[in-house]
Amino acid sequence: MNKNGQALVEYVLIIALISVITVSVVSYFGGYLKDSMTKTSCSLVDQVYVEGEKPGEAVCMDKEEYEAMQKQQKGE
């Protein structure tokens, strides 16, 4: 049997396994990764980071908009 072909198949299988693991990890932690990038971008543009109910739902708000939202929630 051709040993070069066997080595190529082994490399393809290793790459496929690494790809599946990478996609699984990103799918599982995707919301947390998105939140961390959102938090960083909020600090860069001088806005307030507001957590969402679920991972991946966080947003950036202007400080005035955030304070108005807080007052509205306290008034309810």
Image (spheres, helix red, strand yellow):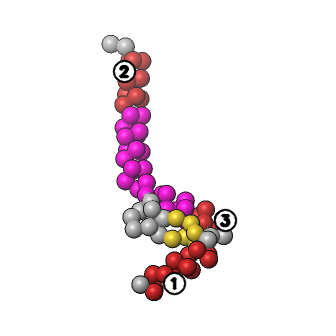
Quarter that holds the N terminus: top left
Q: Which residue is mark 1?
A: 71
Q: Which residue is mark 2?
A: 6
Q: Which residue is mark 3?
A: 45
Do the CB atoms of the residues marked 3 and 1 lie less than 8 Å apart? no
Q: Position of residue 48 (x, y in %)?
A: 58, 72
**What residue do we see at 37% from left, 40% from top?**
20
Specify whether residue 76 is painted magenta: no
Q: Residues within 10 Å of mark 3 (few under 14, many from 20)?
A: few
Q: Disc 3 or 1, which lies upstream in sequence?
A: 3
Do the CB atoms of the residues marked 3 and 2 lie less than 8 Å apart? no
Q: Give the amino acid type for the residue marked by disc 1 in the picture.
A: Lys
Quarter that holds the C terminus: bottom left
**What residue do we see at 45% from left, 86% from top?**
75
Foreground tag (2 vs 1): 1
The Cα atoms of the two marked residues, 3 and 2, are separated by 53 Å
Residue 5 seen: yes
Establish if 76 lies above or below 57.
below
Left or right of 17 on screen, residue 38: right
Q: Disc 3 or 2, which lies upstream in sequence?
A: 2
**What residue do we see at 66% from left, 65% from top?**
44
Foreground tag (3 vs 2): 3
Left or right of 29 on screen, residue 61: right
Q: Residue furthest right?
A: 45
Residue 56: name its quadrant.
bottom left
Q: Residue furthest left?
A: 1
Specify whether residue 20 is painted magenta: yes
Give the magenta-colored segment's residue range: 15-39
